[in-house]
Amino acid sequence: MKLSTTILAAAVIAAGTAKAEPVAPGEVQFGDYGGIAESLTGKAGDPENGAKVMKTKSIGNCISCHKVTALSDAPFHGEVGPSLDGVADRWEEAQVRGIVTNAKMTFPGTIMPAYYKTEGFTRPGKAFTGKAAEEPLPPLLTAQQIEDVVAFLMTLSEE
Amino acid sequence: MRMQAKAAIAAALIAAPGLASADPDDDTLIVNGEIEMTTKTSAPEHMSDTYIDTIMSGWHFRSDETQALQMDDFDNSGMIFVDTGRAQWEQVEGSEGNSCASCHEDPADSMKGVRATYPKWDPEAEEVQTVAMQINDCRTENMGAEPYGYTSTEMANMEALIAVQSRGMPVDVKIDGPAREMWEKGKDLYYTRTGQLELSCANCHEDNYGNMIRADHLSQGQINGFPTYRLKNAKLNTVHARFKGCVRDTRAETYKPGSDAFVALELYVASRGNGLSVEGPSVRN
């Protein structure tokens, strides 16, 4: 009895630490259709920061390709990708997480960059310097930034 | 004062939605009221495996204001550099006591049609040469002078002087025979997805021309207008400097201007413009 409580406590601690450490880019488990069921960080995303990531040129820069009415305070929304209005009505959260993490797992061959990928590139460069860089590269977004973006996208419901 | 600011904002707001869904326009480019440019024409045969059936000059994708700057040489800042290029043409340099004019005399005669056919196979050098390579060959071999930097101001000026002699003539780059191998290599590069963003030239300039990417209206990435005077950096820009910028923007390691890779890419991209008029120096934003 005593023993099993200790074991239980150990298990809880282990789970706790496992949760605190975000899933590494190479360890992400995609479902058959490119979705990711579990949060990458185990922490809830912050939709406000997600909005900031999406519209800031030096961070996510998602609006360079997507129109998002809720972000219309930022100028110059592109039209290479579809409008993200109502995206939460079209996709489950797991699928949205998969798309933001590596859209190529959902849409094979898509032009949309993979935001949580660190190797396997052709002529990888050091950010926008044009200089060579060694893989693994830092991912374009951190695990928490991805969760923040997912949290924001899940607020884009029109129903 | 207040009123004016408000009116300006209102005007900007009205203009914005038009911009956001701007397809290439149907304007006609006539320079100085006399040189009529072919800025849209059927895609060359070799592009039959692409989505593109009409090739278009980058001029169509620019705003009316920017377009107007190319319609009159007095408004085209690129023409100032043609004048500087002409001064360089006359300048004796190097150990042989020659200027370009010593051998080529008036560029209006000797350089007419040259820009339209480059890059091209040089049978003596046994390689595909760009105009820039040819200029530097003449500087080192025929003048005993230092080569220009591949994307330097001097090179851009000289390229502008040479391009302007072919304005209005159709681009006619040969892709068969010994140039074929370089052309194939250039085509491979055009479709290679580089950098951390994993984007190829084709992703932007073939799949998405006509679409806005952030504040930029994507064109077909044609080079018939080079060198281009860009409002953004207020100078003449060479083809390889432009390529470098586009590759860099994919978060990739770029190729070097003048490298085999960029010469091959230039040949391939030039051939996608076969049939468009030479426009250099053009004006872009």
Image (cartoon, coloured by chain):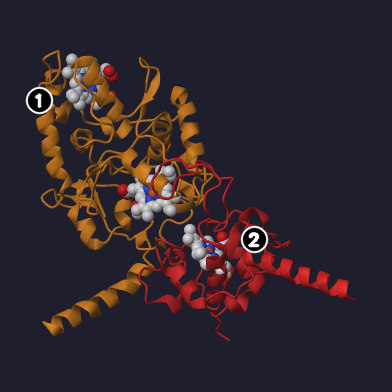
Chain colours: A red, B orange
Q: Position of residue B204 (x, y in %)?
A: 45, 53
Name the residue rendered at 55%, 78% in the picture: A86
**How many other residues sit within 10 Å of disc 1, few (<14), some (14-19) or many (≥20)?**
some
Query: Which chain is disc 1 placed on?
Result: B
Which dot marks residue A78?
none
Tell me the quarter of the picture where residue A77 sits: bottom left
Place of residue B49 in the rendered image (x, y in percent of width and height, measured from the top left): 54, 44
Pick the residue in front: B116 or B203.
B203
Rounded to the nearest angstrom, the CA distance separating label 2 from label 1 is 64 Å
Kindly report which numbered mark, 2 or 1, lies closer to the viewer in this rendering: 2
Marked residue chain, label 2: A
How many neighbours does mark 2 have within 10 angstroms: few (below 14), some (14-19), or many (20 or more)?
Answer: some
Question: Which sits in the foreground, B150 or A101?
Answer: A101
Residue at the far bottom: name it: A159
Q: Secondary structure at mark 1?
A: loop
Residue topped by disc 2 = A23
Amino acid at the residue labelled 1: Gln
Of A2 and B183, the residue lying toward us: A2
Seen at 82% across and 69% down, the residue is A7
Report whether residue B98 is seen.
yes
- Left or right of B155: which side holds B48? right
Quadrant position of the C terminus of chain B in the picture? bottom left
Query: On the rendered structure, is B18 left or right of A35?
Result: left
On the question of residue B57 being in view, the answer is no
Residue placed under numbered mark 1 in the picture: B91
Q: Callout 2, which amino acid?
A: Val
What residue is shown at x 13% (from left), y 52% (from top)? B75
Horizontally, residue B64 falls left or right of residue B124, namely left
Q: Secondary structure at mark 2?
A: loop
